[in-house]
Image (cartoon, rainbow, N blue to C red):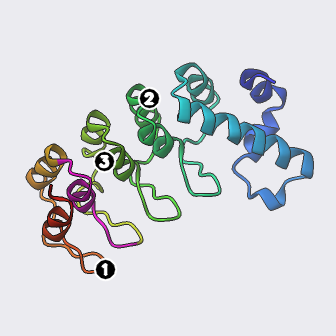
Amino acid sequence: MRIRTLLGLCPALCLSLSLPAAELPQSQQEAREQIDAYLFEAARHGHLDMLAVFAESGFDFNRQDAKGYSPLILAAYHGHAEAVDFLLEHGADPCLQDRRGNTALLGAIFKGELRIARTLMKAPCAANQRNNAGQTPAMYAALFQRSEILDALREQGADLNAVDHAGNSVQTLQQLTAP
């Protein structure tokens, strides 16, 4: 079923999407799961037309799947810069973390998506927000040898002396990955 049709079936369904799943009847839970699947797939594949349908419907772009991935995290990780821009313009929270504490910025750094990383670095959380392992964006940039991003984070005031839960800092991570 096409997403526009699904969202148009019942205005009450869209309103119920903000309720906890346990409070919904089984049929609405199933419809909600299907709509969420469409949302996450649209973000994962950068389908702006589908994302626009969700935006027109007033959909919450800060929804998260079972792993804690939001549409923004998925779009950033998979390199869809236009989708990242669209989601940010429509209220996606760049500071939102997945179950491991990783943000869209960390995903973009990991994947080497420099343009997306630069966009996400404009968020107030970007420079020193830590994941569950205590790693910062600067640590990710050092670990994955993204010197351009590390330089930009340094200019933005990133704490280059921060230490993660394993005792690693930007400097030790750069030494580990040096050729």
Q: Position of residue 35 (x, y in %)?
A: 73, 37
Q: Where on the picture, by quarter, is residue 174?
A: bottom left
Residue behind mark 2? 86
User: Which is more N-terminal, label 1 or label 2?
Assistant: 2
Decide which of tag 1 and tag 3 comes sooner along the chain.
Answer: 3
Residue 109: mark: 3
Whole-angstrom CA distance, mark 1 to mark 3, is 20 Å
Where is residue 150? Give x, y as percent. Answer: 16, 52
Residues shaded magenta: 133-146
| Above or below, 13 relative to 137 | above
Q: Residues within 10 Å of mark 1 (few under 14, many from 20)?
A: few
Q: Residue at x 38, y 29 (%)?
A: 81
Instruction: Say which residue label 1 marks.
Output: 166
Q: How far is disc 2 from disc 3 in space, using C-alphas?
A: 19 Å
Dot 3 amino acid type: Ile
Residue type at tag 2: Phe
Q: Amino acid at mark 1?
A: Ala
* In the rendered image, the vertical position of residue 117 relative to residue 19, given as above or below: above
Residue 96 is left or right of residue 166, and the answer is: right
Position in image of residue 129 (x %, y %): 31, 63
